Image (spheres, rainbow, N blue to C red):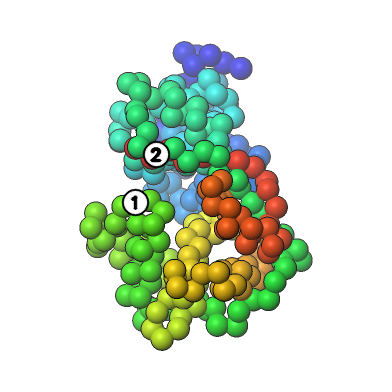
Amino acid sequence: MATSSALRVSRLGPADAAQLAALIDREPVTNVYLRSELRLGFEAGDWWGAFDEAELTSVVLGWSLVVPYIPDLDAAPPLAQALTASAQPRMVVGHRASVMALHNAFRPPRPARELRDPQPLMVLDRGDLRGTPSADVRLSKRGDLEALIVAAARMHREEMGVDPLVVDAPAWRMRMLSLIERRWSWLWMRENEVLFKAELSAWTPDVVQIQGVYTAPRYRGQGVARAGLAAVCANVFKDVPRCSLYVNQYNVIAQRVYERLGFKPAAVFATVMY
């Protein structure tokens, strides 16, 4: 393993696509977000790679949101230096070892506003789904946008302690609209209210990553989340054989829902917020 001083760090581009794909394909479930973003092309993100001579050993996709894959932990310091020279990351999320190595490599040190560690990464394979999907769950449509914006913002406030409609309402609106247009958003409506929702954060032909699983507070404890998520997974399984998601360790209720649906632990993630 090369020392950090011997590693070369540079921005990645189309010429590096084959090496990058081979690297992140080593762990297809853990790296589903990176693999999904690579399918969109290099214009969609800011990719940095660490090279040991000509071999790509580690990679970071980042700007304000940073997702690392650093199997060679010696690459963390030069990657951290490259990142902070071009941006100020607000969140690092991904496989625990890579996240913590990058976080600890920032110089000067960056105090974490919040550290969510550990976050179990769970997977569900087609054929292992348990539970009855709700027939009322459907893909979100443009006409659902306003209700979806409100529900997603409520979840964000609950989960992150920040109101995205105060921080940047137009950006939040565009984010939710893009999920609808990509057919990555599902919901369950009742009387013009979002009863349940979930989105995808990544898609590849072999695995997707689910995010934003939310049940409106007054409908919790009634089996809504289980029936709603079962419906989302059943729909995904028409095209893709595996679903994944990660969850905060302290969210025992959510973990029980996922386990009852058939999700099993696969790895451990962590999130650092600045």
The answer to whether the residue labelled 1 contacts the one labelled 2, judged by CB atoms less than 8 Å apart, is: yes
Under mark 2, the amino acid is Glu
Q: Looking at the image, is mark 1 or mark 2 earlier in the sequence?
A: 2
Judge from the rendering whether residue 105 lies leftward or rightward of residue 268; answer left or right.
left
Q: At numbered mark 2, what does the secondary structure look like: helix, strand or loop?
A: strand
Under mark 1, the amino acid is Gly
> Which quadrant would the N terminus be assigned to in this image?
top right
Q: Is residue 185 above or below residue 75?
A: below
Please state the horizontal and vertical placement of residue 192, each as a whole percent of the image: 38, 83
Q: Residue at x 62, y 62 (%)?
A: 257
Quadrant of res 89: top left
Please state the horizontal and vertical placement of residue 104, each as a whole percent of the image: 44, 25
Q: Distance between the residues labelled 1 and 2?
A: 10 Å
Q: In this view, does 83 lie above or below 41?
A: above
Please state the horizontal and vertical placement of residue 166, each as a whole percent of the image: 23, 58
Q: Which residue is drawn at 30% across and 35% down?
A: 88
Q: Label for residue 114?
A: 2
Please state the horizontal and vertical placement of residue 56, each as a whole percent of the image: 55, 29
Q: Label for residue 161?
A: 1
